[in-house]
Amino acid sequence: MAEVIKMPKMSDTMEEGVIASWLVKEGDEVSSGDILAEVETDKATMELESFEDGVILHIGIKEGDAVPVNGVIAIIGEKGEDIDGLLKDIENGEDADGSDKSDDDKSDDKKESKDDDGGGDEVDASDVNASLITMPKMSDTMEEGVIASWLKKEGDKVEAGDILAEVETDKATMELEAYEDGTLLYIGIKEGDAAPIDGVIAVIGEEGADYKKLLKAHEQKSSGGESKKEENKNKSEDQKSTESKSDSGSPKPSPKAESANTEKKGKDGGRIFASPLAKKIAQDKGIDLADVDGSGNNGRIIKSDVENFTPKQKASEGAKQESKSEQSINIPQVVGEERYEEVKVSQMRKTVAKRLAESKFSAPHFYVTMEINMDKAMEARKSINEMSPVKISFNDMVIKAVAASLRQHPKVNSSWMGDKIRRNQHIHVGMAVAVEEGLLVPVIRFADNKSLSHIAAEAKDFAQKAKNKELEQKDWEGNTFTISNLGMFGVEEFTAIINPPDACILAVGGIKQTAIVKDGELVPGNVMKVTLSCDHRVVDGAVGSAFLQTLKGLLEDPVRILI
């Protein structure tokens, strides 16, 4: 008997999966344990395994398309088995996520479909030999992607594996790959504009195919809310087009904005092909990519091309520009002239803003601050570094002391789960690392069981990977407590917003030499202030204070950390 294969839930936060590639096709015989497809989840690209023996009778999801958890993706059964009835039941009796719809829901859907297309007949696009290209989910927290640049234009021939565009996500700038051969018939998103997950960004198919019919059919299937979003997007695009026409007599945008939102042209007037890393290095070094010869495929500029580039015949031009800039400095500015530059929010910054806003406004924060005498810690660090294979920082000592304190105060090592509180028995300490586009929190796992030198080596490696955007998914997941240290920037004291799902975060200030009272006398000492931000739903004031007392005792007498 035929069995329906549904999209499994491959991670705790997964809501849908994208079929990255099918490793089988309709008619293939498979055995239990065979890999059917590669699925891109919100965490990573994983393999979809068959749990039945039989023949692939039907594949319902194309490569590159997304399907919600429990959505039907294929049917497996005996060779020649009739599955027409099963397909009809799936189409008429189940929702996209595999749940049955009530008659009222079905009638509502039909009504909405008619309203969306103006009451006309349903558009049948089955005869259109073309496929929609939608925005894939390229990271666990990604909700939309910005088209940084198109590497193909309408009318271009493309093959499976060709890079269509560069997409800026909340984590990095990534390449959008074509999964089939054909002609790029339609581009729906302009460079610099954003598209939501699964939003249509392009159409690839047979040359001359009626892609408008395909788009219309897709719009009919969309909900009323999605249709309104599409209309709003079209209105905004029309508005931008009108503004661009009216701007012909207005001042030109700033150089940064102009370089980010317009196509760069090469020496022959064509588009410049360059990897995201090559573009970033060129921008940092002030190199014009039009002057760089690419050694990659089809003349694509790569990292080594920019690093090995030697400017030619630019000295005189640079001197002229410098003299012009010097002359412009002598021209007095108009008093009271107002200027500003608008910079588009990166995907990483959007995600940081959303997560921390949710934390701040949903979790009732309270704060406990304490001063810690670091005299002995400074002496201990100097002695430890004489023997340690890795240089130990004060932050490493704080991580180790925090891990030891969490072992004594497990209530602080907890998470709010709505109807229950999770007491974590393992200790994974997240360390906030500032990067150019926002904030990343790599995790030191089982920190209470690691030595100081082990923590120091791991922390340095994570910090370097974060700055180079080389962190993997597993590196920033699973934190049970977080530390944010701004002491190296000269900050004496601050409060931090709790990093979900943690119940607490520790804000660490810098060590300051000041006057302290010791044995009834005023003497110089080295003091560090720490502030614990607590979720009052999980941690009470007495529990937070007791945790800080333990932390203070460990750092003021570092030998105790090793016990």
Image: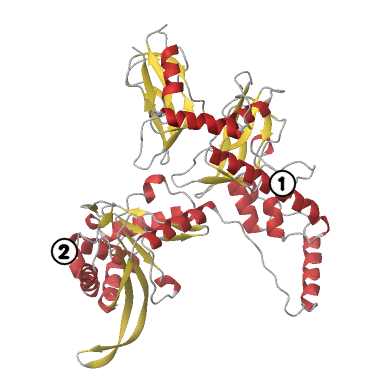
Q: Quadrant of the C terminus?
A: bottom left
Residue denoted by label 1: 238
Q: How would you rate the neighbour count of disc 2 (Cα within 10 Å): few for under 14, some for 14-19, many for 20 or more? A: few
The relative height of residue 172 versus residue 52 in the rendered view (above or below) is below
Residue nearest the viewer, comparing 148 with 470:
148
The circle on residue 215 is none
Q: Secondary structure at mark 1?
A: helix
Residue nearest the viewer, comparing 479 with 315:
479
Mark whose residue sits in front, 2 or 1: 1
Residue denoted by label 2: 563
Q: What is the x, y in percent for residue 323?
A: 80, 70
Q: What is the x, y in percent for residue 526?
A: 32, 81
Q: How would you rate the neighbour count of disc 1 (Cα within 10 Å): few for under 14, some for 14-19, many for 20 or more? A: few
Q: Secondary structure at mark 2?
A: loop
Q: What is the x, y in percent for residue 443?
A: 34, 54
Three-letter code for the amino acid on which mark 1 is drawn = Asp
Q: Quadrant of the N terminus?
A: top left
* Chain-order first, disc 2 or disc 1: 1
The relative height of residue 173 versus residue 4 in the rendered view (above or below) is below
Left or right of 257? Residue 36 is: left
